[in-house]
Image (cartoon, rainbow, N blue to C red):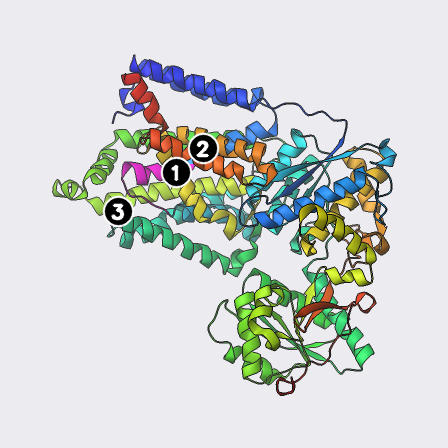
Amino acid sequence: MASGVAAGSGFLYARNGALLAAALAYPFLFRQSFPQDLAIKIFLFGGLASAWNVLGGFAGQVSLGNAIFFGVGAYAAAVVQTQWGWTPWAGMLLGMAASAGIGALIGYPCFRLKGHYFAMATLAIGEVISTLFMNWQWVGGAVGVYIPLRDDTWKYFQFGTTKLPYYYVMLAFLVSALLLSAALLRSRMGYYFRAIREDQDAARSLGVPARRYKLAAMGISAALTSAGGSLYAQYVLFIDPHSVFPMMLSIQVVLIAILGGVGTLWGPVVGAMVLIPLSEFTRIYIGGTGSGLDLIAYGLLIIVISVIQPRGVLGFFRKAGAA
Amino acid sequence: MKRRFANVSGMAMAVALTALLAMPAAAVDKVRIGAIYPLTGPAGSTGAELKDAITLAADIVNGKYDLDLPLARTQGLPNLKGAQVEVIFGDHQGKPDVGQAEAERMITTEKVVALMGAYHSSVTTTASIAAERHKVPFLNPESTDPKLTERGFRYFFRTTPFDDQFAENFFQFLNDVKKQKGAKISSVATVYENTNFGTGVNNAIRKNAAKYGYRLVADVAYAEKGTSAIAEVQKVKAAAPDVVMPASYTADAILYMKTFKDLNYAPQAILAMDAGYISDEFKKTLGKDGEYVLSREVWALDLAKKKPMIAKVNEIYKKRFGRDMNGNSARSFTGFLVLADAINRAGSTDPEKIREALEKYTLGGNMMIMPWDGVAFDPKTHQNTKGRGIIVQLVSGEWYTVWPFDLASRDVVWPMPAWGKR
C-alpha cells in the first residue's frame, strides 16, 4: 500500500502546506466556540488514532487498551499541579515516560499472545488500571482531580474564554503525531513493523527482532496517547477514572483509525474528520430529544461505511482514483 | 492523475464540512435557558424524567396555574413584560467533556441567559467551569458532591442539599428522637463501601458526629460486593453503638441486613444513607426482614399529606408524562422555578444582573414542593442553606416519611424491634 508521503512529489508538499495553512486560518474564519471545539476534538482524536495506528496499524498489534495511556497522561498533568504545584507541561513529559514504561510492562508478557488474545489482554488490563485509579486515594480516588481555575497562563496552560491556544496546541499534537508516523513509515523501523504485521514468523526468520520492535511500537504509541491525555485534562480541567479510562475511548480510537484507513498515514485523520463531526452533529440536532436517535444514526453510518468500503474512507479516494 | 482526483474530492469534503458548521442564528424574543442533562447513555431514563419535570416547570411559568409556586399565577416573566421562557435542552451523555462543550455552545451559539444541570456531579463540575469563564449563571438542582460549592465560583449556585447536609440531618433527627421519645442515644457506628460514595458519607458523618456531640465508636470500611459480612458486622456489634449508619449499594445492603439478623444484632436503629437500602430490590428480597430500616431521602410522594400542593403538581405531571415524580424530578422542577424566578426578579436578561439576583434570592418553604425551609444561597459558596433531606422508614412494605416531624406521614418506630419479637 503506497503511503502519501512516500511519493514525496512537490505537489504533495504543496498540498500538505495548503492543508496546514487552512488549519491555521480556520479559527479566524470560525470564531464561535462550537466549531472551534469541534476542530479541537478532531485534532485530539486524530492524534490519538494516529498513535494507536503506530501499534495497531503499522505493527499490526491490535490494542483495545489505549485508554490506559490516555488516562495516565491526563492524571500526570493534573496531579503534578495539585500535589506539587508543577506546570502541567512537566506532567505531560512525566506521563509520556510513565506511559511508555507501562506500555513496555504490558507488552513484555502480552506480546507472547497473538491476534485476538493480545487484544483481549489489553482490554482486561485497561479495566484493571481503571479500578486501580478508582481506589488510589493520593490521586483523588473515585472523586477525581479538580484542576484549580487560573487566569490565562501558558505556564499552567489555561485560557478562559479564548480557545485559540488550545486549538493550536492540539493542532501541534496532531501534526507531531503525523510527522512521527510519516518518518516511521519511511524508516527501517517502519519496514520492520510492517514485516511483523504481515507475518511475524517470516519476519523473525529473516532476522527481525520481533519482540523488541513490538515493544518499541507500544512505547511510541503509549507516549503519544499519553500526551493527548495530558492536553485533554488541561482542556476540561476535571478528570476522574470514568472520564479518562473508559473502555469506550479505547474502542473509539480503533474505530476512527479503521474507519479512516488502518495502517495509512492519513487514515486516522480522515476517520476523525468523519466520525467526530458525525457524533457531534447527530447529538446536537437530534440528541436533545432524548430518544437515542442520534446514536442510532451514528451507528448506522459507521455500518454503512464499513460495508461499502472495508478499507476505510481513504479507500473511496483510492478506488475512485484508480477507476 | 490518480492523486489529483483524491485531492479534489478531499477538498470538496472539507468545503461540505465547513458549510455544515455555519449555524443558524437564534431569534431572541424569548428568554432562553439552557438545560444540560444525560438524555442518552446509562442515565438516559433519569435524564428523560428531569427533562419532563423542567418542561412542566417552564409551562407553569409561561401559563397560568393556581399553585403556590413562583410565577405560577402570572403568564411569563412579569418584570420582563411577560416574556416567555424557552428551555434549550442539551445532551451530555454522562460525559464531562461533552457537558462542557454543550455549556459553551449554549452560551455562545444558542445565546442562553443562564444554564442549569447536569445531574452527574462530574459533568456539573466541567459544565460549570465553562459557565464561570463566560460569566453566565449556572444553577445546579441535583448534584450532591461537596466539592462543587467548595470551589467558591461566582456564577455557580446549588439548590439541592448536599452530602454534608444529609449527614447533618442524621444527627438533627437523632436529637429530635431523643426529645420526642426520651431515647438514650450517644454513640453511632458507620459501615460503608470503600469507594467515592461510602468514604464521602463516612467523612461527613464523622465531621457531624463531632459537631453534634455523638461518639463514633466504630467505622468499618468494606469492599463492594463481598460474599460475607460476618467479620464487619461483628466489629460493629462489639463496639455496641446505639445507631448503625450504613452506606451500601443494593447487593451489599441486602447482605448486611441478612447478616444483622443472622448474628441477632439489633441496635436501636439502622439509619441508612439512601442508595441500596432504598432500592426496590432491598424491599422485595428481604420482605419482613428489611422492615423498620430508616433511610435518608430527598423527597417522597407522601409529603403531600402535609403539603397538598405536591399531590396537585404530581397529578399534572403524571397525567402528562405517565409516571409519578420522584426525588430527582422534584429537584430539577424546583431548580428551574428558582432560576426563572431569579431572572424575573433581576428584571433583565443580563447574566451579571441574574447572578446578583440569585445572590439576593430568597424563597419560603411554602412556595415549593420540596421539604425544605426555603431557598437562600450562602454568600460565599452559593450553596442553598435552607435545604434539608427527609428520613423515611420501611413499615409494612411501604416507605413513610417520619422526619422532619412536621412533615411526617407516620410516627417513627423507635427502637427497631428485636429480631425474635417480629
Q: Which residues are magenta?
A: A48-64
| Quadrant location, the N terminus of chain B | top left
Determine contact: label 2, label 3, CB under 8 Å.
no
Chain to which the residue tagged by mark 1 belongs: A
In the picture provided, is B92 more to the left or to the right than A206?
Answer: right
Question: Within the magenta stretch, is there residue A49?
Answer: yes
Q: Of the residues under marks 2 and 3, which one precedes in the sequence? A: 3
**Residue B126 visible somewhere in the drawing:** yes
Do the residues at discs 2 and 3 belong to one chain?
Answer: yes
Q: Residue B139 versus residue B275: which sits nearer the camera?
A: B275
Q: Which mark is residue A275?
A: 2
Residue B388 image offset from top left, x and y in percent: 76, 61
Residue B166 in the image: above or below residue A286: below
Callout 2 secondary element = helix
Residue B162 in the image: above or below residue B125: below
Q: Which mark is residue A255?
A: 1
Determine contact: label 2, label 1, CB under 8 Å.
yes
Q: Residue at x 81, y 65 (%)?
A: B407
| Residue identifier under label 3 | A115
In the picture provided, is A316 more to the left or to the right than A140?
Answer: left
**For the residue marked with disc 2, what is the amino acid?**
Leu
Callout 1 secondary element = helix
| Quadrant location, the C terminus of chain B | bottom right
Marks 1 and 3 sit apart, C-alpha to C-alpha, by 17 Å
Residue B40 image offset from top left, x and y in percent: 56, 44
Residue B200 in the image: above or below residue B128: below
Q: Of the residues under marks 1 and 3, which one precedes in the sequence? A: 3
